[in-house]
Amino acid sequence: AQSVTQLGSHVSVSEGALVLLRCNYSSSVPPYLFWYVQYPNQGLQLLLKYTTGATLVKGINGFEAEFKKSETSFHLTKPSAHMSDAAEYFCAVRLPYNFNKFYFGSGTKLNVKP
Amino acid sequence: EAGVTQFPSHSVIEKGQTVTLRCDPISGHDNLYWYRRVMGKEIKFLLHFVKESKQDESGMPNNRFLAERTGGTYSTLKVQPAELEDSGVYFCASSRDTNTEAFFGQGTRLTVV
């Protein structure tokens, strides 16, 4: 069974500090990897995705993530947190041979302190 | 272009009652998905429609859940009778093709008391 692990259900950073949200997956084949963000009272919004090619991918709002196959990780980072980044973040995978479904992690709530 | 729309945004029902959730996908999107997040856990796949046909319903928890997509446009997800463990947030998503970006709705928060 596929699984996606997000370390830390709550992460708190100060405004201007580095944001690091961790995601590890288990898969026998390299999956497609995604980060979604959910702001309060809104739907899930795609932040960025990795399918093939360059392992460092850049997304919206200054976020980026790096696919590390050897570590089965896809951690999300942003150099400098902004108050507007406060939201819940979900890591997800899709398998190349079963592309119709996402496997999500349990989410990480990011709190940004002034 | 309107996004994926879900109705209602919140629903509180008593155990044993029936609830119907609705999802309007983005126009032209043949693929429609239902997901559920229970008790702050991971978001789990329920099922996938291609037009009006159920492509994959492997995630449906039991026969108290019935999803339909008559005419291949909007979809409904009925829970009958509802149980306490059905509480959670139900997300709908749609995509033009299975390998293109999926767009998610804001979710319906269902509370069974």
Image (cartoon, coloured by chain):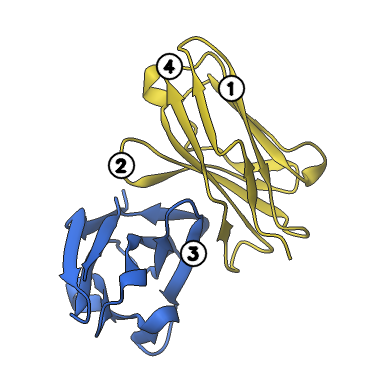
Chain colours: A blue, B yellow
Q: Residues within 10 Å of mark 4 (few under 14, many from 20)?
A: some
Q: Residue furthest front?
A: A114
User: Which kind of residue does numbered mark 4 sit on?
Assistant: Glu
Q: Earlier in the sequence, mark 4 or mark 2?
A: 2
Q: CA distance from mark 3 to mark 2?
A: 18 Å
User: Which kind of residue does numbered mark 2 sit on?
Assistant: Gly
Q: CA distance from mark 1 to mark 4?
A: 11 Å
B51 above or below A82? Answer: above
Q: Earlier in the sequence, mark 2 or mark 1?
A: 1
Q: CA distance from mark 4 to mark 2?
A: 18 Å
- Percent x, y of residue B4: 64, 54
User: Which kind of residue does numbered mark 3 sit on?
Assistant: Gln
Circles 1 and 3: CB atoms closer than 8 Å: no
* Residue at point 69%, 52% (across, down): B25
Circles 3 and 2: CB atoms closer than 8 Å: no
The residue carrying mark 2 is B40
Q: Quadrant of the N terminus of chain B?
A: bottom right
Q: Secondary structure at mark 2?
A: loop
Q: CA distance from mark 3 to mark 4?
A: 30 Å
The residue carrying mark 3 is A45
Q: Secondary structure at mark 3?
A: strand
Q: Earlier in the sequence, mark 1 or mark 4?
A: 1
The residue carrying mark 4 is B83
User: Which kind of residue does numbered mark 1 sit on?
Assistant: Val
Circles 3 and 4: CB atoms closer than 8 Å: no
